[in-house]
Image (cartoon, rainbow, N blue to C red):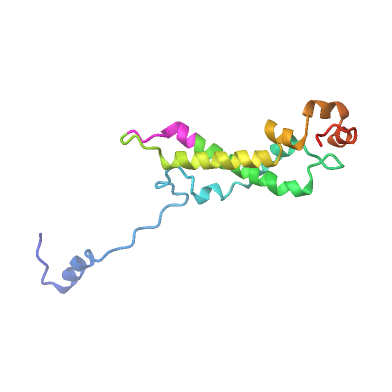
Amino acid sequence: MSPLSTDPEKKKKQLANLKPQPAPPAPEGNQRRLVHGGRSELLLRDVEAEVRELMDALDEAVPVRDGDGGVPVADVTAIERCARALKRYRHLSQWLDLHGRIEERTGAVKPAAELELKAEAALAAALDGLGLTPTSRAKLGLDLARTARHGSLAGFIGEGGAAR
């Protein structure tokens, strides 16, 4: 430990070192503390292009169509919700595939793995809501093979093909 200087200017500099200084701002796009990102706002920011791409793919797969062959307007929000759930699930799954689901030192399940299970459940519910699973299509009374033979869902239902 060095003694304080008797020179007032030097003493001022010495004491200035003892005052807490704010940390410098993080550089743009800093992700040093980002662990799995499951709760990150990065999942919500700048994802519109990816979500739009997923929405377009889901839009083509949705079995229920309106009169002009498009997706019913009422389903657009459900498709977006499903696309966002798919993005979140993929993001967490990729991170966990790389880093593992179990903490090696303790054997405990990583928090990201628990988030992945929640994201998977949300995705399953969103897919069910859109009729994109075999079970949900059966509940809707849709037989896609027979529907295809009739050319449209409306034609299939009009001929008594849907479950009553």
Q: Residue at x 62, y 41 (%)?
A: 125
Q: Is residue 133 visible?
A: no
Indicate whether 5 appears above or below 117: below
Specify the farthest residue to the front: 164
Residue 137 rendering spot, x and y as whole percentages: 73, 34
Q: Residue at x 44, y 32 (%)?
A: 98
Residue 62 rendering spot, x and y as whole percentages: 74, 37
Residue 73 rendering spot, x and y as whole percentages: 78, 48
Indicate whether 90 appears above or below 72: above
Q: Is residue 86 left or right of residue 98?
A: right
- Compare residues 120 and 10 and report the one nearer the observer: 120
- Compare residues 115 and 162 and report the one nearer the observer: 162
Q: Is residue 52 visible?
A: yes
Q: Residue at x 20, y 71 (%)?
A: 12
Indicate the quadrant where residue 10 lies.
Answer: bottom left
Where does the magenta region start and end? Answer: 94-104
- Does the magenta portion include 7? no
- Does the magenta portion include 96? yes
Q: Residue at x 30, y 63 (%)?
A: 21
Indicate the quadrant where residue 50 lies.
Answer: top right
Q: Is residue 53 left or right of residue 15?
A: right
Question: Dividing the image into 4 quarters, which one contains the C terminus?
Answer: top right
Question: Dividing the image into 4 quarters, which one contains the N terminus?
Answer: bottom left
